[in-house]
């Protein structure tokens, strides 16, 4: 896999989660505000919109812990579009509006109320109401269910059974269902048929709205950068429906889980808790489950960021039941054979390898062998004790540079918090004076670097502080809540973004959208 079609041309984009979009129903959606943001990106001379994973979230609301690697988050279904389709009325939706379109997301409120409203749409869809176009919509739904049966049936049944078990993890279900005994499954399919159909319907709504949004972006010349975690959540339909693909015992309980070893940042390491893959089984099937998963992911985006890319070379295995990551060990992953299969099955797909953190020579070789661009994060660059690979003068062309990611503080807040010696080093390196904005200085450094692609979190273009941070890793509560005030997306901001993007040669040649080389 040599340098070529898997790489990005010189371009720029913005990182903003869908949930951070403004809107009157408490969370960002796939509707009008998303289209308006795409319009703004086009006006600002951007060519990429990077989002976070779109799956339905579980406890903690993290998009990296989802009930399914295939399903979409029902919270993102746009209510106004359901009103326009005749599935809801304005009167039905009005009690679910929030006064402040930009208030932090209240996930508890949404969890308690959103499905009540969506069920009204389902009842109208399945009932005898004379809704214009309903017959055509029902035909589309029937086709959707057939075309997506390979994952949809299992997911919808999983969510229906979970609801009947008060939301408990499938590890706590009665053994016949936990172990997928056929008699128990058949009984559940009958008993929970309506509930499962409701959740299939929500997936249909999400798919229709997302496809329309992606088409809108494509016509505007904006490419979507998606994001896929290497691991799936333990409590997910993926694990429940495919236990043979994961390191589970005969009771479908994990024998080992994922995480990171102790380091300078954490004396006990990071215990993620995701089940690990049985890579021998995956390889024996030609990685078929993975190829289906990636094919679906690529149908949702133009470029795919694969999180924790190093896990394909080697992964950290922690015995299940331990409370910390201190007693794990490293195991070999599938290596380059996985990506040879990917290229054979899906062609020259467009991948960003999340290769952050401590990397061994073997991991570096794997990234190089694939030809995929890795990531460079400027906030990691200014350790005054060393010459970091994240400093722009050390970049290769084939990389994607960020000021920060969804796991970082905003650049304005980051600069205030780093040690004084690092702040002095950053100021000198970036040519900052007393009145300089750290966010603007890092943004200029990213755009002016040789990196083929620069992706800037929108908060840094806006110069926002700690209040706009998306996530604090390894914490619960207060994460994934920040929302954009649309009034901040001014013509003046768009003009400044477009000017700097053009100044540093990140406009597509001939006015065309960015593509890979």
Image: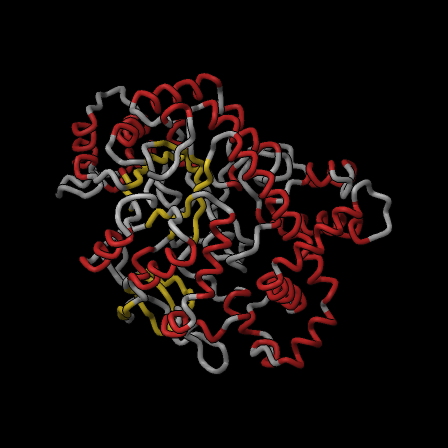
Viewer-proximal residue among 454 and 235: 454
Q: Please provide percent x and percent y for residue 441.
A: 28, 26
Q: Please provide percent x and percent y for residue 132.
A: 81, 40
- Give the number of marks: 0
Q: Does any portion of residue 109 appear in the rendered image?
A: no
**Colour mode?**
secondary structure
- Quadrant where the C terminus is found in the figure: top left
Viewer-proximal residue among 38 and 253: 38
Viewer-proximal residue among 492 and 455: 455
Q: Please provide percent x and percent y for residue 451.
A: 27, 36
In-image side of 361 versus 79 (left or right): left
Q: Is residue 272 above or below residue 357?
A: below
Viewer-proximal residue among 448 and 340: 340
The quadrant where residue 49 appears: top left
- Identify which residue is drawn at 13% across, 41% down: 387
Q: Please provide percent x and percent y for residue 76.
A: 59, 44
Q: Is residue 135 above or below residue 85?
A: below
In-image side of 51 versus 78 (left or right): left
In-image side of 240 versus 510 (left or right): right
- Identify which residue is drawn at 38% across, 52% down: 306
């Amino acid at each position: 896999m040599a340098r070529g079609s898997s790489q990005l041309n010189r371009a720029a984009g913005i990182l903003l989660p869908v949930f951070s979009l403004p809107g009157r129903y408490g969370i960002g959606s796939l509707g009008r505000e998303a289209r308006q943001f795409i319009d703004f990106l086009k006006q600002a001379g951007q060519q990429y919109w990077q989002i976070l994973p779109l799956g339905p979230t579980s406890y903690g609301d993290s998009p990296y812990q989802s009930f399914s690697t295939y399903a979409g988050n029902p919270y993102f279904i746009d209510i106004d579009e359901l009103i326009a389709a005749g599935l809801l009325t304005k009167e039905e939706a009005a009690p679910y509006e929030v006064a402040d379109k930009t208030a932090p997301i209240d996930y508890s409120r949404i969890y308690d109320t959103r499905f009540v409203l969506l069920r009204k749409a389902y009842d109208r869809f399945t009932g005898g109401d004379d809704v214009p176009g309903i017959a055509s919509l029902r035909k589309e739904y029937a086709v959707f269910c057939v075309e997506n049966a390979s994952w949809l049936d299992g997911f919808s049944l999983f969510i229906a059974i979970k609801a009947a078990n008060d939301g408990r993890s499938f590890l706590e279900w009665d053994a016949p269902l936990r172990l997928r005994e056929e008699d128990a499954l058949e009984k559940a399919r009958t008993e929970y048929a309506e509930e499962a159909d409701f959740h299939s319907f929500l997936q249909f709504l999400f798919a229709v709205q997302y496809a329309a949004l992606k088409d809108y972006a494509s016509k505007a010349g904006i490419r979507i950068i998606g994001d896929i975690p290497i691991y799936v959540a333990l409590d997910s339909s993926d694990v429940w429906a495919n236990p043979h693909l994961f390191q589970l015992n005969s009771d479908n309980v994990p024998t080992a889980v994922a995480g990171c070893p102790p380091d300078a940042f954490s004396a006990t390491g990071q215990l993620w808790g995701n089940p690990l893959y049985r890579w021998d089984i995956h390889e024996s099937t030609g990685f078929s489950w993975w190829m289906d998963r990636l094919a679906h992911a690529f149908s949702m985006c133009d470029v795919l960021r694969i999180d924790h890319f190093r896990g394909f070379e080697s992964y950290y295995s922690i015995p299940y039941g331990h409370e910390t990551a201190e007693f794990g060990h490293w195991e070999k992953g599938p290596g380059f054979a996985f990506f040879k299969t990917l290229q054979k099955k899906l062609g020259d797909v467009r991948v960003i390898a999340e290769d952050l953190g401590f990397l061994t020579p073997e991991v570096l070789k794997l990234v190089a062998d694939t030809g995929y661009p890795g990531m460079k994060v400027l906030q990691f660059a200014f350790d005054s004790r060393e010459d970091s690979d994240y400093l722009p003068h050390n970049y290769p062309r084939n990389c994607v540079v960020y000021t920060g990611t969804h796991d970082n503080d905003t650049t304005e807040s980051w600069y205030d918090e780093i040690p004084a010696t690092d702040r002095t080093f950053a100021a000198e390196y970036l040519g900052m004076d007393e009145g300089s904005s750290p966010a603007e200085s890092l943004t200029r450094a990213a755009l002016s670097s040789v990196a083929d692609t620069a992706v800037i979190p929108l908060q840094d273009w806006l110069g926002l502080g700690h209040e706009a941070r998306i996530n604090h890793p390894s914490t619960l509560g207060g994460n994934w809540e920040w929302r954009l005030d649309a009034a901040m997306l001014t013509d003046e901001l768009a003009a400044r973004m477009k000017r700097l993007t053009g100044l540093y040669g990140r406009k597509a040649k001939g006015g065309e959208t960015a593509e890979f080389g």
